[in-house]
Image: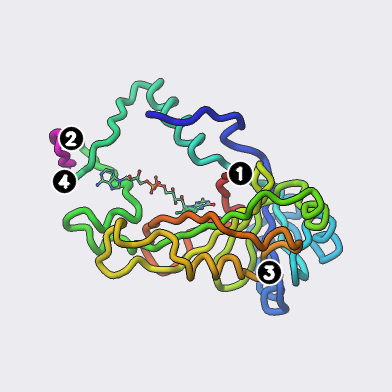
Amino acid sequence: MSVPPFTRPASMPSAAQTLATSAAQEARLRHRLEQERAWGDDAGIVRYLEKTELDDRLRVAGAVGALYSPHCARMQPAGLVAGLAEAVTRAGVRLHESTPVTSISAGRARTPAGDVRAPYIVRCTEGFTADIPGQHRTLLPMNSSMIVTGPLSDKAWKSIGWDRFETLGDEAHAYMYAQRTADGRIALGGRGAPSRCGASPARSPPCPGSATGRLAGNRSRPAGRGCTGCTPSTGRRTGWSQPAIPRARPCWPAWAT
Ligand SMILES: Cc1cc2nc3c(=O)[nH]c(=O)nc-3n(C[C@H](O)[C@H](O)[C@H](O)COP(=O)(O)OP(=O)(O)OC[C@H]3O[C@@H](n4cnc5c(N)ncnc54)[C@H](O)[C@@H]3O)c2cc1C
């Protein structure tokens, strides 16, 4: 496995904040806090930040409050994968890369290099599952896109705050998440564009301009003029089993790019 050297640990302690930018979002946040309390989560796990306290941490245009959880880790996904590969190899697992599975049946995964037989076959092909024969309708391929700003100036960071690098989301019905990257940019993500019917990954542009535009226009972006120059973007297929958002609250792990 060829991975770049990492100068940072794969996981960094952080905290998570979910913002409200309207009265309706605030009502949903407060309702969610009640639900967390009903599960026994006290203020050490999750608590409400009023606007003044939120502003001390991070200034977001239109934000009126936030749910805050100190328990969160930001992960460098490539570092995570490299570390996992190293750990399982050390434990005696044989890894075979660059080996496409062309079909899966009970106890057998077929590849151009030969069949792999095992009592259990675990299919971990996410949004690519639809390309495997017989699995076309198993998972819904859904495009997920991210954009990242250019590096922000010290002046912009002074006006934004965000010194603790909390992961960020909001309570809008449209999905979004953001974080301050280690190299001083803001990475923003969202999702929702289904892959075109029957399209292969090659024919599905990963991050269409319209998605980038929607992300760049996201009203939850932090205050500060430095955020406007969003250009580089990335995106890829994810696989969804049901029309629900599979996320853990309140701490949605975030990739530190
Ligand atoms: C832009 C973007 C941002 C995201 N941000 C976050 C975030 O902040 N936090 C978070 O928790 N999650 C995030 N996610 C989701 C997260 O990345 C995925 O849920 C996670 O990577 C899924 O891991 P996986 O190993 O199940 O699948 P994947 O990482 O998709 O791996 C599937 C693998 O299967 C391989 N494969 C496909 N077909 C075959 C075949 N026929 N034979 C052999 N191999 C095959 C693929 O090459 C791939 O390596 C994001 C996703 C995207 C696209």
Q: In the rendered view, tell whether residue 219 sits above or below residue 252.
A: below
> Which amino acid lies under the numbered mark 3 shown in the image of this protein?
Leu
The residue singled out by tag 3 in the image is: 29
Is 50 one of the magenta-colored residues?
no
The x, y position of residue 54, in whole percent, is 80, 60
| Mark closer to the chain start, 2 or 3 | 3
Chief secondary structure of the magenta portion: strand
Task: Count neighbours of disc 2 (C-alpha within 10 A) and say few if under 14, some if 14 to 19, many if 20 or more.
Answer: few
The residue singled out by tag 1 in the image is: 74
- 160 relative position to 204: left or right: right
Task: Determine the CA span between mark 2 and mark 1.
Answer: 35 Å
> Which amino acid lies under the numbered mark 2 shown in the image of this protein?
Val
> Which amino acid lies under the numbered mark 1 shown in the image of this protein?
Arg
Q: Are marks 1 and 3 in contact (CB under 8 Å)?
A: no
Residue drawn at (30%, 56%), measured in percent from left and top? Answer: 202
The x, y position of residue 229, in whole percent, is 64, 60
The kind of secondary structure element at disc 4 is loop
Residue drawn at (48%, 59%), measured in percent from left and top? Answer: 145
The residue singled out by tag 2 in the image is: 116
Nearer to us of marks 2 and 1 is: 1
The x, y position of residue 69, in whole percent, is 70, 53
| Mark closer to the chain start, 1 or 3 | 3
The residue singled out by tag 4 in the image is: 106
Q: Which residues are magenta?
A: 104-117
